[in-house]
């Protein structure tokens, strides 16, 4: 009798469990369809923005605004020439100091009588070290600009000097000093690595020495 009741309960519960499972699956499918539609709409919007921001449309917009062909405008030709010159300068400085900037964002945070506060995000690398900077600047009406907050994200746990450099830069809010010191530090690391690669280190229990590739031994 007990076994019969158990079988009866199973027969009643199983359809309900299957029904609940089907409902959950249908809800999940509906949710996925909605997300897919939203993603498709976002993709279409992004494509429209890309087309809108294309150089052709920008030139057409400028020509419509100025009422003439901007390629014939001496001012526009001067701007384009200056832009090429600035790009060449950036490549030159990247070669000299090893710093390459890959991403930069700027956003207005607030405006007041004192001036305007901007949020900046800067991403790049210096030789083999990657960095990400988030900082705020206060730009006064007198065109004076001051860094008022600085946060540096770097993998610096492997070197105490680098860790101290990051900490000191965040306290002093000295962006220029940070980049100068970082460039010198990475250049020193590269030079040190290159120098030691020329030696094959040998160590005896009594007479440690460096052995040059030519076979000459130098005692330490």
Image (cartoon, helix red, strand yellow):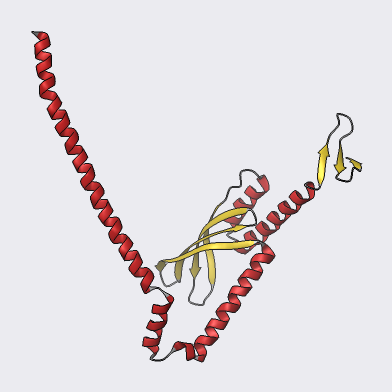
Q: Is residue 89 above or below residue 38?
A: below
Q: Is residue 88 left or right of residue 111?
A: right
Observer-nearest of 167 and 212 = 212
Q: Is residue 202 left or right of residue 47?
A: right
Observer-nearest of 119 and 77 = 77
State the residue at coordinates (59%, 76%).
Answer: 86
| Residue 170 horizontal/vertical position (percent) | 57, 55
Quadrant in which the C terminus is drawn: top right
Q: Is residue 28 above or below residue 172?
A: above
| Residue 50 horizontal/vertical position (percent) | 38, 69
| Residue 151 horizontal/vertical position (percent) | 53, 55
State the residue at coordinates (37%, 82%).
Answer: 61
Q: Quarter-wise, where is residue 130 in the image?
A: bottom right
State the residue at coordinates (9%, 12%).
Answer: 4
State the residue at coordinates (53%, 86%).
Answer: 77
| Residue 102 horizontal/vertical position (percent) | 54, 62
């Amino acid at each position: 009798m007990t076994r019969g009741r158990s079988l009866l309960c199973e027969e009643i519960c199983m359809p309900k469990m299957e029904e609940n499972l089907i409902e959950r699956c249908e809800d999940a499918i509906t949710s996925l369809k909605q997300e897919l539609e939203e993603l498709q709409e976002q993709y279409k919007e992004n494509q429209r923005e890309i087309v809108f921001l294309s150089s052709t449309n920008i030139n057409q917009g400028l020509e419509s605004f100025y009422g003439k062909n901007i390629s014939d405008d001496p001012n526009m030709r001067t701007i384009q020439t200056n832009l090429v010159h600035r790009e060449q300068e950036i490549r030159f400085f990247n070669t000299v100091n090893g710093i390459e900037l890959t991403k930069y964002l700027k956003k207005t945070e607030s405006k007041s009588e004192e001036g305007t506060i901007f949020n900046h995000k800067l991403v790049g690398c210096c030789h083999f070290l990657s960095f990400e900077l988030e900082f705020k600047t206060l730009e006064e009406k007198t065109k004076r600009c001051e860094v008022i907050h600085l946060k540096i994200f770097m993998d610096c746990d492997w070197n105490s000097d680098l860790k101290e450099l990051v900490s000191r830069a965040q306290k002093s809010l000295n962006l220029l000093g940070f980049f100068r010191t970082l460039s010198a530090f990475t250049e020193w690391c590269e030079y040190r690595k290159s120098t030691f690669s020329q030696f094959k280190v040998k160590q005896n229990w009594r007479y440690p020495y460096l052995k040059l590739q030519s076979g000459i031994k130098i005692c330490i």
